[in-house]
Amino acid sequence: MSGCGHDHGNGGHDHGNGGHDHGNGGHGHGNDDHDEELKEVLVSLEVDQIAALEEMAKEYAAKLGQKWDLSAMLRVAVGHFLTKMGKMA
């Protein structure tokens, strides 16, 4: 998911950052007041999962008036899962 243009096992599709900024404010969806440190990792997802996250990013962008990308949606999804499992508050 580095967006480098190489095939990293995703069927030749580049599901990288799509030109979006991943380092602004810790969420990759515009300027906000969060200062979370981000670390880039390679994640393999099912095609259906990618499509659903990209659709959610569009919905969030429309509702909130900010640009959301796949990376931001993954952080939301992982954060929700970890909170549900009692690993984060």
Image (cartoon, grey):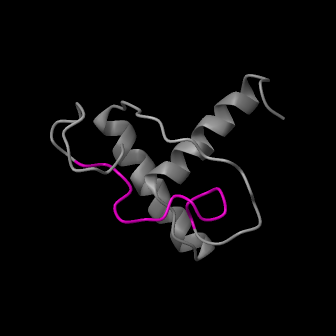
Q: Is residue 8 left or right of residue 67?
A: left
Which residue is at the far right?
89
Question: In front: 75, or 34?
Answer: 34
The residue at the point 40 percent across, 53 percent down is 54
Which residue is at the far bottom?
65
Quadrant assignment for the C terminus = top right
Asked if residue 12 is positioned above or below residue 28 in the image, the reply reads above
Residue 11 falls in which quadrant of the image?
top left
The residue at the point 74 percent across, 57 percent down is 35
Quadrant assignment for the N terminus = top left
Asked if residue 55 is positioned above or below residue 77 in the image, the reply reads below
Which residue is at the far left?
12
The residue at the point 60 percent across, 65 percent down is 24
Image coords of residue 32 (percent x, y): 71, 69
Q: Is residue 76 left or right of residue 84?
A: left
Most common secondary structure along the magenta stretch: loop
The stretch of residues the image draws in magenta is: 14-29
Question: In front: 60, or 35?
Answer: 35
Image coords of residue 7 (percent x, y): 19, 39
Image coords of residue 59 (percent x, y): 50, 63
